[in-house]
Amino acid sequence: MDWRRLCTLGRELPEVSEGTWYGTPALLVRRKGFVRLKEDGRTVVFLLDDVDDQELLTAGKPELYFITDHYAGHASVLARLARLRTGEARLRLLQAWRQKASAALQARLDAPEPRRPRARRVRP
């Protein structure tokens, strides 16, 4: 994974744009940051649902997720970008996006797709 690919995946979510957050490249939903590239260019910060998720992720996948003292106790986690895979990235992007997206945007994402009427065969 690299930052360009992560941005492409992030833009699959409603109203996501690229910008800056804390002075680094970021993904935003309606101008609110939810994931950003760290200054080292190799690490990203994802927002989490709950600070308890931090321990679950860092203990479960320490090769991918970690925190520094700065992030201890905050509902966010650091991820090694090069080790991040597409499925995991989509999951973390969605979780982070939900932290900043409005209820209306979340409802739009969660709404079932309208069913298309089936084409009827016309018999000769």
Image (cartoon, rainbow, N blue to C red):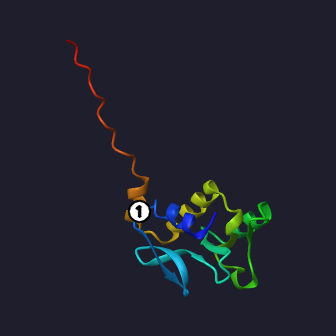
Residue type at mark 1 is Pro
The residue drawn where x is 50% and y is 63% is 8
Q: Quadrant of residue 117?
A: top left
Residue 114 visible within the image = yes
* Image-based side of 61 in relation to 27, left or right: right
Check disc 1 and report its element: helix, strand or loop.
loop
Q: In the image, residue 58 lies at what x, y percent?
A: 76, 67
* Image-based side of 103 in relation to 52, left or right: left
Q: In the image, residue 68 lies at what x, y percent?
A: 75, 81
Number of numbered discs present?
1
Residue for badge 1: 14
Give 68 or 74, whichever is nearer the viewer.
Answer: 68
Q: Quadrant of residue 49?
A: bottom right
The residue drawn where x is 64% and y is 63% is 1
Residue 53 visible within the image = no
Q: Badge 1: few (under 14), some or many (20 or more) residues near its Cα, within 10 Å?
A: some
Residue 56 to residue 121: above or below: below
Q: In the image, residue 123 lies at what x, y percent?
A: 22, 13
Q: In the image, residue 93 lies at what x, y percent?
A: 56, 64
The residue drawn where x is 40% and y is 46% is 112
